[in-house]
Image (cartoon, coloured by chain):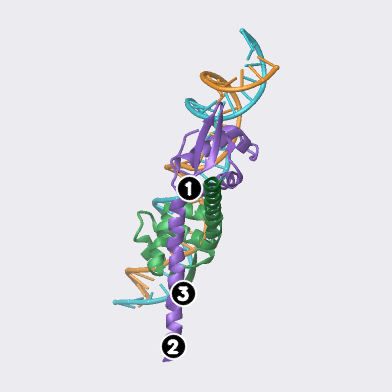
Chain colours: A green, B purple, C orange, D cyan
Amino acid sequence: MAIPTLDAFQVIGDPSRRKMLMLLSADSMTISSLADNFDMSRPAVSKHVKILYTAGFISIRDIGRERYCTLKKDGFEELQGWISYFDEFWTSKLKKLETLLNNKLVN
Amino acid sequence: MAIPTLDAFQVIGDPSRRKMLMLLSADSMTISSLADNFDMSRPAVSKHVKILYTAGFISIRDIGRERYCTLKKDGFEELQGWISYFDEFWTSKLKKLETLLNNKLVN
DNA sequence: ATAATAAGTAACTTTTAAGTTACGCAAACT
DNA sequence: AGTTTGCGTAACTTAAAAGTTACTTATTAT
């Protein structure tokens, strides 16, 4: 079970990991309660959790023999930055079109 | 060169494809002008372009023997929806914390 | 003390995305 | 007409993520 180091985009590229983040948006969960929601072995879930943790999408709190996973903002921030760059792109493109149309109407 | 069908998240999971989108945010480009920016064969670039096209991140306009790639909004929208879901999560979490703190101060 | 539960690690296999080279075809030069 | 340029496709290889089973450790419960 080699642990690949993935960037934020690769991390959310996997559907299972996105599902995990969705589940955790409802509530903190332990590894095995997470695993109950997946058709894969617990070690596989464990690996995904580690990837999410490493990339800053979740924090983990150990309580006895259990590990509680909780959403963490850090991982999402890189994504937000990227998305908002293209948001800017579209809005500025719209503005340019607007200006163009206004000029056409005036002239 | 099998053409995998990837979802929007898997599409931007690849660093090369993200770079392509960045390049295209400056201007429309042909396949080979795109390829000039990468340390990989042109067919490889071609494949990435096809993936971007299939997922709705770009449109392609054929002019003679050249193909011009242009950014297209569609592909980005699924990503925006996902991101804004978690944006909501964090803001509502902050609101709850705020309310909690206010109650503590009042009581 | 023993058994059961929660989870990590190791060693491996499977899957598949990502890359390559070789080739073909159509548009555009000369 | 012949050649170059832009690009697609096919067949294949490579690399790495994603999964498995078997085992170990630590905590909790009986």
Three-letter residue code for mark 1: Lys
Residue A5 in sight: no
The residue wearing badge 3 is B94
Choose the circle earlier in sequence order: 3 or 1: 1
B88 left or right, relative to B34: left
Choose the circle earlier in sequence order: 2 or 1: 1
Q: Quadrant of residue A16?
A: bottom left
Point out which mark residue B104 bears: 2
B99 left or right, relative to B20: left
Marks 3/1: CA distance?
31 Å
Residue B1 in sight: yes
Chain letter, disc 2 residue: B
Do the residues at pointers 2 and 1 share their chain?
yes
Marks 2/3: CA distance?
15 Å
Three-letter residue code for mark 2: Lys
SS at badge 3: helix
Three-letter residue code for mark 3: Leu
Do the residues at pointers 3 and 1 share their chain?
yes
Chain letter, disc 3 residue: B
Q: Residue B12: horizontal and vertical position, in percent?
A: 51, 49
The residue wearing badge 1 is B73
Q: Residue B10: horizontal and vertical position, in percent?
A: 47, 48
Choose the circle earlier in sequence order: 2 or 3: 3
Asked if the residues shown at circle 2 and circle 1 are in contact, with their CB atoms under 8 angstroms apart, the answer is: no
Determine crowd level at label 2: few under 14, some 14-19, many 20+ residues with C-alpha closer than 10 A: few
Taking the spot 40% from the left edge, 61% from the top edge, the residue there is A22
Q: Residue C2: horizontal and vertical position, in percent?
A: 35, 72
Taking the spot 49% from the left edge, 46% from the top edge, the residue there is B11
In this view, A105 is above or below A64: above
Quarter of the image for the C terminus of chain A: give it: top right
